[in-house]
């Protein structure tokens, strides 16, 4: 069996002959020769034997392909597209876990050559499969040549950002969008994320969010947001302000996935998420009343209201995490707004039969996946979290007359699963080491304003001792 060096030497010589002879119909024979190099470069020992000569020859082939495609742009001959695709496959394989080849390929000008071809693919407007395949292979090569190689990343970024990346993200072909997002993620460091704030570059950030809900292979788009964009709270704020309501929900979904990651965040990530949490608090306060639109008949898909629901879900999750709880407990106006929203939705549910009406018969029919299901329960959950070991917020709920409101929402409600459990948790947090709140609940029972059976279901009962009313937990039998 021939040694790897003999194989590499043989195909290099054949490639050299073909480039020099330039026979008629050479693009077809050339593709076969390049394909043999592609197969060799699947093996690590062959990749390590590649020299500058091979990559210079491939550079010449791509230059010729560029000339032919530019002159034949209106014809349907796919031969030069096929040859370009095979060259890109060859280069893609050559770069795999091989930094020396990445550097050589960059030094012989193949990044520039690839970008020139990709720009022709973009401007041709053709949707022929042969062109799309060449486009996809070119993006895969660029992703491999940039992987772990800062110099190649910078070279590629200089030539592709923002226009080529924007074209890929908005392309009708899902694979081109996916591969383009892979290259974008690979090249993007913290400084480049900040560059997204510039007006000419900002559309790329928005296109990432729009593409995420459209592209089936969205893993790289997910990572661009969670591992890159969230490092820059100012970019997140600017994006949120510019996105449509539906795309805002996509952005909030991605932030939620980051919050729920099991891996422990770094201190820098925690600081960034705290800033984002404060911004989301402001967003909820500004938009919260839009949720009341869902009380209107047939108005179940009001997008701004759905954004409010998603914001509430995210704030509940963030306040369940010690990393973010403190900053949200201190957010001006947040607790007031949550209590006010609970009061308004509770009132709306009493005024007419709608999604906020308490029911024991599943009035929404079989559609218990409606976005408003659980909204009041989540409001009470957020109140509970904001009052956790926080005397100032405990007292604020008392001042806002929020305790009777919470107790009035303690009944079983098919539209709000776990409502009773969250109410129990809220009362527990409101009364912990807070005699004033304990006395208020006890006096409500004394005055007949609180149903004793309801308190018992919550695991509470009232005792009178030395002329004072005390709220006690019922011991389980």
Image (spheres, helix red, strand yellow):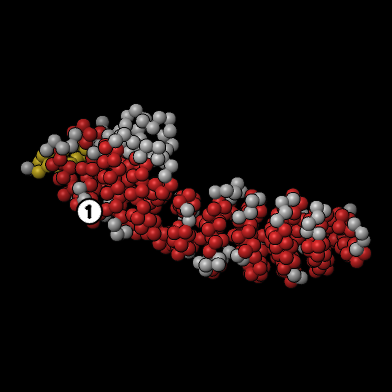
Q: Looking at the picture, how far across and down is residue 399, in whole percent? A: 19, 52
Residue nearest the observer in this picture, 170 or 144: 170
Residue 219 located left or right of residue 271: right
Kindly tell me whether residue 384 is visible in this rendering.
no
* Quarter of image, res 414: top left
Residue 367 located left or right of residue 11: left
- The residue lying at 39 percent from left, 59 percent from top is 279
Q: Looking at the picture, how far across and down is residue 369, in whole percent? A: 43, 37
Q: Quadrant of the C terminus?
A: top left
* Quarter of image, res 203: bottom right
- Would you place residue 9 above or below residue 468 in this image? below
Residue nearest the observer in this picture, 38 or 411: 411
Element under disc 1: helix
Residue at the far front in the pictured view: 74
Task: For label 1, count other residues whose C-alpha is less than 10 Å away and answer few (under 14), some (14-19) or many (20+).
Answer: some
Q: Looking at the picture, how far across and down is residue 41, in whole percent? A: 78, 57
- Would you place residue 190 above or below residue 309 in this image? below
Residue 175 located left or right of residue 93: left
- The residue lying at 69 percent from left, 59 percent from top is 122
Q: Looking at the picture, how far across and down is residue 93, in whole percent? A: 75, 57
Residue that badge 1 annotates: 396
* Quarter of image, res 378: top left
- The residue lying at 81 percent from left, 65 percent from top is 67
Residue at the far left in the pictured view: 467
């Amino acid at each position: 069996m021939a040694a790897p060096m003999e194989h590499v030497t043989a195909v290099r010589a054949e490639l050299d002959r073909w480039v020099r002879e330039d026979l008629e119909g050479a693009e077809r024979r050339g593709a076969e020769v390049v394909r043999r190099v592609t197969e060799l470069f699947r093996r690590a020992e062959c990749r390590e034997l590649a020299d500058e000569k091979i990559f210079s020859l491939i550079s010449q082939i791509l230059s010729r392909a560029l000339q032919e495609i530019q002159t034949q742009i209106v014809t349907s001959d796919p031969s030069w597209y096929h040859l370009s695709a095979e060259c890109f496959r060859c280069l893609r394989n050559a770069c795999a876990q091989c930094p020396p080849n990445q550097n050589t390929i960059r030094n012989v000008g193949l990044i520039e050559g690839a970008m020139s071809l990709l720009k022709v693919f973009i401007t041709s407007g053709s949707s022929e499969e042969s062109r799309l395949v060449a486009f996809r292979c070119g993006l895969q090569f660029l992703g491999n040549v940039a992987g772990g190689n800062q110099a190649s990343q910078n070279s590629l970024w200089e030539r592709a950002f923002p226009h080529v990346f924007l074209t890929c993200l908005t392309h009708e072909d899902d694979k081109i969008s996916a591969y383009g997002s892979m290259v974008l993620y690979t090249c993007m460091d913290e400084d480049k994320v900040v560059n997204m704030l510039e007006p000419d570059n900002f559309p790329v950030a928005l296109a990432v969010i729009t593409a995420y809900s459209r592209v089936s292979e969205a893993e790289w788009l997910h990572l661009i947001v969670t591992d890159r964009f969230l490092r820059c709270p100012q970019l997140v704020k600017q994006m949120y302000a510019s996105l449509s309501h539906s795309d805002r929900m996509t952005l909030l979904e991605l932030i939620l996935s980051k919050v729920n990651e099991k891996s422990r965040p770094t201190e820098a990530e925690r600081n960034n998420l705290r800033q984002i949490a404060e911004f989301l608090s402001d967003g909820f306060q500004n938009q919260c009343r839009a949720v009341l639109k869902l009380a209107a008949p047939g108005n179940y898909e009001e997008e701004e209201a759905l954004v409010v629901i998603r914001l509430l879900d995210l704030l509940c999750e963030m306040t369940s995490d010690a990393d973010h709880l403190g900053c949200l407990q201190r957010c001006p106006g947040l607790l007031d707004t949550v209590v006010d929203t609970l009061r308004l939705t509770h009132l709306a549910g009493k005024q007419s039969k709608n999604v906020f009406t308490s029911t024991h018969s599943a009035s929404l029919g079989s559609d218990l996946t409606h976005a408003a299901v659980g909204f009041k329960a989540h409001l009470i959950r957020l109140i509970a979290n904001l009052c956790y070991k926080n005397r100032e917020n405990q007292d604020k709920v008392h001042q806002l007359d929020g305790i009777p409101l919470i107790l009035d929402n303690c009944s079983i409600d098919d539209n709000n699963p776990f409502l009773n459990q969250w109410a129990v948790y809220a009362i527990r947090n409101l009364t912990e080491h807070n005699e004033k709140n304990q006395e208020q609940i006890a006096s409500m029972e004394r005055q007949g304003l609180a149903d004793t059976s309801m308190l018992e279901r919550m695991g509470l009962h009232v005792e009178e001792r030395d002329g004072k009313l005390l709220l006690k937990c019922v011991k389980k039998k």
